[in-house]
Amino acid sequence: ARKAALSASSGPGATSDGHKVPLLANIGGPSDVPAAVEAGAEGVGLFRTEFLFLDDSKQAPSEEKQIAAYRAVLEAFPEGRVVVRVLDAGADKPLDFLTPADEPNPALGVRGLRSLLDHPDVLRTQLTALAKAAAGLPVYLEVMAPMVADRTDAKAFADACREAGLSAKFGAMVEIPSAALRARSILQEVEFLSLGTNDLAQYTFAADRQVGAVSRLQDPWQPALLDLVALSAESAKAEGKSCGVCGEAAADPLLACVLTGLGVTSLSMGAASIPYVRSTLAKHTLAQCERAAAAARATDTAEEARAAAQAVLSGE
Ligand code: PEP
Ligand code: MG
């Protein structure tokens, strides 16, 4: 029992019967790396590169500045996995030189990958900087695009990665319901999926993530959201590819078990949540997680889903 307790407080993420679920950190830059290492993160599952662009909203940071920041993060996880998300500007993160000023509905406008495809020079500089930063390092670099809507988006991103000479895996975030519904078609262009459950909830329920009055609909336990997670994970499995979660949902220990039961292959979260998720996951078998996931999906509300999963996992 002591050995089990020890392994649950450090080491790789896994269910009690040894089904591995890598636990990765969400970071905003090199300054978040020490906390991630301290929490025993097995790598980075979401490097939000927006922070690099916040100093100057008139222009993109130079290639040199980007290389230095990317290298500092990549060097911290030798032989680990680092998933870098290209710039996600627009909506709640507007940048003067990228985001149209007159959008009536910025969350539905030119944001994420859309703004990068409109500014291919910005995307090219970022991808080239990543390629140079990773050169000669043993790290497993993966690069993903935010706000991929369909196969056309995924292909445009993969083409840009290839043109920049990036030797990394290219992936797509699933943040828009269309991407979950057609995940298998998107996976013809990219090698992995990562569910951004914050935006996926926003777009599934037409509920602005910044508006408290609709927060009920932002609950990641909503069965409709669980259905889209399941569809994405099943699609990835059918294509022999991986599907992680990097939204806030992964930081809820009980929900992390349910996501595992739905077939999600890695969980990325703020470093502070990693120990709790690791120890909760280590208490349950994969079969229990699958039963909890099925019970949650059989309900009609977030509250019922949470209670149903809790009942299964506590053996009631
Ligand atoms: C998400 O939408 O779930 C996500 C991880 O991206 P962000 O929160 O940065 O939009
Ligand atoms: Mg998002």
Image (spheres, rainbow, N blue to C red):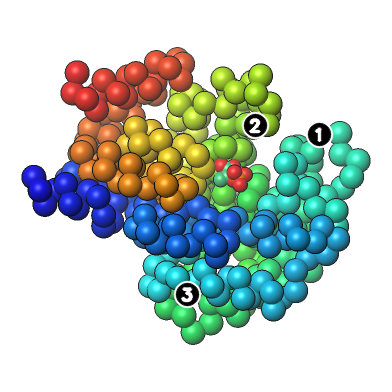
Residue at the image point whose x is 50% and y is 71% from the top: 74
Kindly identify which residue carries mark 3: 75
Instruction: Tell me where residue 243 appears, x and y as whole percent.
Output: 44, 49
Q: Secondary structure at mark 1?
A: loop
Image quarter for ligand 1 equals top right
**Which amino acid, mark 2?**
Arg
Residue at the image point whose x is 17% and y is 52% from the top: 6
Residue at the image point whose x is 57% and y is 49% from the top: 173
Q: Earlier in the sequence, mark 3 or mark 2?
A: 3
Q: Nearer the viewer, residue 106 or 120?
A: 106
Q: Secondary structure at mark 3?
A: helix
Position of 49 compared to 12: left or right? right
Instruction: Tell me where residue 197 appears, x and y as whole percent.
Output: 53, 38
**Which amino acid, mark 3?**
Glu
Q: Earlier in the sequence, mark 1 or mark 3?
A: 3
Please say if 106 is above or below 242: above
Kindly report which numbered mark, 1 or 3, lies closer to the viewer in this rendering: 3
Residue at the image point whose x is 50% and y is 39% from the top: 248
Q: Nearer the viewer, residue 159 or 111?
A: 111
Mark 2 residue's CB less than 8 Å from ligand 1? yes
Q: Answer few, some or many: residues within 10 Å of disc 3's Cα (few below 14, many 20 plus, some between 14 and 19).
A: some
Split into 4 quadrants, where in the image is the C terminus?
Answer: top left
Kindly identify which residue carries mark 1: 105
